[in-house]
Image (spheres, helix red, strand yellow):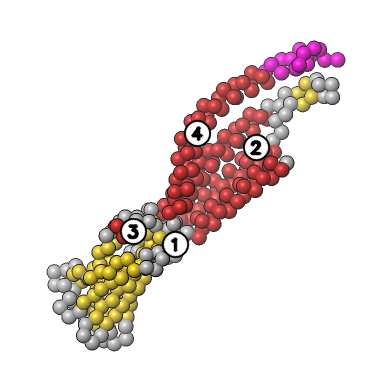
Amino acid sequence: MCNKKYIMGIVFFFVLITMSCSVTAIPPVQTTTTIAEQTNGMIIEYIQDDNIQVDEPFEYQFHVYNSSNGLLLDNTTISCKGHMYDKKGMLILTLIAETQEENGAGFYFNATGGNFTTPGIFSYQAHCNDSTKGGYVSGTIRVSQGGNTPTPEETSLLGYLFFAAIIFWILCLIGYNTINDKHEYDIGGNLISVNFNKYIKMGLGFLAYLFTIIITFMAWKMSIKFLTFNFAFIIFDTIFTILWISVIIVFVALIPVTIIKVVGDMKLWDLANRNLKPYGGKKR
């Protein structure tokens, strides 16, 4: 009984941690356009696309307008610089804006992929000015293994499938730990009935193993899409790889074990039908 409680405690803890990591990792809804404005200064407008993949370069494109009259400003009258900060808030990069159009009206910062070697949330600031006025904008860049934001439909589907797999996994474990697979004997040692529930129990155990692979695989995929810390991706990737490679070994080992149990049960069944005790002699 203590062992069963211990096993179920581990199962509950693993499920709780996995669910917590997956739920808290879902990113907020992003807007498509962001405007930063300084009073009597400049407006910096850019398309918000702040999800990039590890080691992928980040190109930050924007336009600058005069906030008093809305005129588009170019590199003949203003200059723009930017700062990039790592996950700890340390300055890692200072950028000079380059022009993206022939007339110099559009700007961009180009940060190479070598600045984003691990997942995380990186901060940035961009500021533009001339001799009398200026403007700035700040934000964050989300670096992940997948490099994109899943749609709400994809997020919901992954969540439902993940929870369904966990429920079936728990049911298989409960069934495995509660099914009685012992043969029934009387006080004198006579075999009353052969219990074939052991095969159901073995099947539930194997299903639980398969659901463990499925859950780990989904957790690995969700860590690629949602999480911004690397250790979770490494853990799930390693566990899934080990379980997936081992499934053939487990399946091959299960075949002879099942055959041995079937042969043994058939012999017991035959002894019972012949009115013989399993350990020798006749029943009284």
Q: Where is residue 37 in the image (x, y as percent from the top left)?
A: 32, 80
Asked if residue 162 lies in the magenta stretch, the reply is: no
Residue at image position (25%, 73%) is 81
* Coordinates of residue 118 in the picture (x, y in percent): 38, 56
Q: How far separated are the C-alphas under marks 3 and 4?
A: 36 Å
- Give how far apart the Cα atoms at labels 3 and 1 are: 19 Å
Mark earlier in primary sequence (3, 4): 3
The residue at the far right in this view is 284
The residue labelled by disc 4 is: 247
Query: How dense is the environment of label 3, judged by Cα within 10 Å: few (below 14), some, or many (20 and up)?
Result: many
- Find the magenta span and give its range: 266-284
> Looking at the rendering, which quadrant does residue 85 occupy?
bottom left
Sequence-wise first label, 4 or 2: 2
Q: Distance between the residues labelled 2 and 3?
A: 46 Å
Nearer to me, 120 or 205: 120
Q: Determine which residue is flagged by label 3.
A: 116
Amino acid on which the number 4 mark rests in the picture? Val
Mark 2 = which residue? 176
Residue corresponding to mark 1: 27
x and y percent of residue 53 in the render? Answer: 34, 56
Mark 4 or mark 1, earlier in chain: 1
